[in-house]
Image (tube, helix red, strand yellow):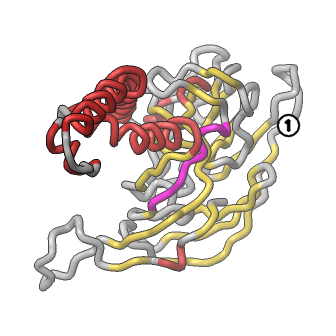
Amino acid sequence: MANSFALILVILTLVTGLVWVFDKIKWAKKRKQAYADLQAQSEIELDDKTLAKMVPENPIIENARSLFPVIATVFILRSFIYEPFQIPSGSMMPTLLVGDFILVEKFSYGIKEPVWQTTLIPTGHPERGDVAVFKYPEDQRVDFIKRVVGLPGDKIVYKDKELYIVPACGDASCGDYKKLDTSFIGDQDFKHESNTVKVYSEVLGDVEHQLLINPLRREQTQAYYQQKEPLTATYEWVVPEGNYFVMGDNRDNSRDSRFWGFVPERNLVGKAVAKWISFEFDRDTSDFLPNWVPSNVRFERIGSIK
């Protein structure tokens, strides 16, 4: 769906752009000459509106010419600068909630052509702690959003609901696993969570963020992605070159790299940088409004993403 929309936008931009160009170099001159001929034959001064009625323009050409600047602006903004996304699930709670609308900086990880995501101009790479949007490796039509935990060459361990990392150091055997700095904040009830969860603060790279742990939910280690080379334990992964290991902040309610593997660099869409609006869609049983109509606006959530 995401790539289909990008392709449609590219086609619309090209078609309306060609119409705009042909109008500038050919059709506009013909219209101007026709107006001049009518004015010369008339005994009174004719205004532009009258001339346009007397020499009607093809409505398809007129609309395409008028829409081109708008479509081109949307195409440039969405493809190369910022793209809006809506958060559909609770996998990134408490950082992102269902109903948050975010802006994704498209140029953070390279300027890419919008359809096949081929990098045109390298501009940077993900850093540990970034909240990144990417094409789901198992279905390129779907966009996912998770936090970058492991960089190329890192060793990752997630065991007993604790995260350990050995940063890449050029030697497969170097370094010891280091548990990430975490501190307990408190218990909290969240919508879309069946049990009270524990909120922790975690330092990941230069980013301090909050995460959720559900103490009543067992780890699904039997469903973890098993790496073939190098051979690792069930709860351990070594990030290949050109790939990243990502996890949701809602650690017990996130389908992420633990279950399906790594994110290739070519799949990266951009870095989530801000929440520009946030809606609640919860309905009271006595409320007859449809589910897609917001029940509340959470203005307090507007701001940057950590």
Residue 268 occupies which quadrant of the picture? Answer: top right
Secondary structure category for the residue under label 1: loop
Farthest residue, direction front: 43
Rendered location of residue 290, percent (x, y): 15, 69
Return the residue nearer the eye: 286 or 31: 31
Side of 304 relative to 292 (left or right): right
Residue holding disc 1: 176
Side of 61 relative to 21 (left or right): left
Return the residue nearer the eye: 300 or 214: 300
| Residue name at image x 26 percent, y 50 percent | 45
Farthest residue, direction bottom: 286
Span of residues in magenta: 101-108
- Residue 209 highlighted magenta (yes or no): no
Quadrant for the N terminus in the image = top left
Side of 293 relative to 22 (left or right): left
Q: Amino acid at mark 1?
A: Asp
| Residue name at image x 36 percent, y 33 percent | 9
Return the residue nearer the eye: 121 or 94: 121
Q: Is residue 206 visible?
A: yes
Local packing at callout 1 (Cα closer than 10 Å; few below 14, some 14-19, many 20+) is few
Q: Is residue 3 visible?
A: no
| Residue name at image x 55 percent, y 77 percent | 187
Quadrant for the C terminus in the image = bottom right
Return the residue nearer the eye: 162 or 89: 89
Side of 82 relative to 155 (left or right): left
- Residue 106 highlighted magenta (yes or no): yes
Q: Is residue 294 above or below residue 150?
A: below
| Residue name at image x 43 percent, y 59 percent | 90
Rendered location of residue 19, percent (x, y): 33, 26
Q: Is residue 94 above or below residue 272?
A: below
Rendered location of residue 246, percent (x, y): 59, 40
Which is the main secondary structure of the residues drawn in magenta? strand
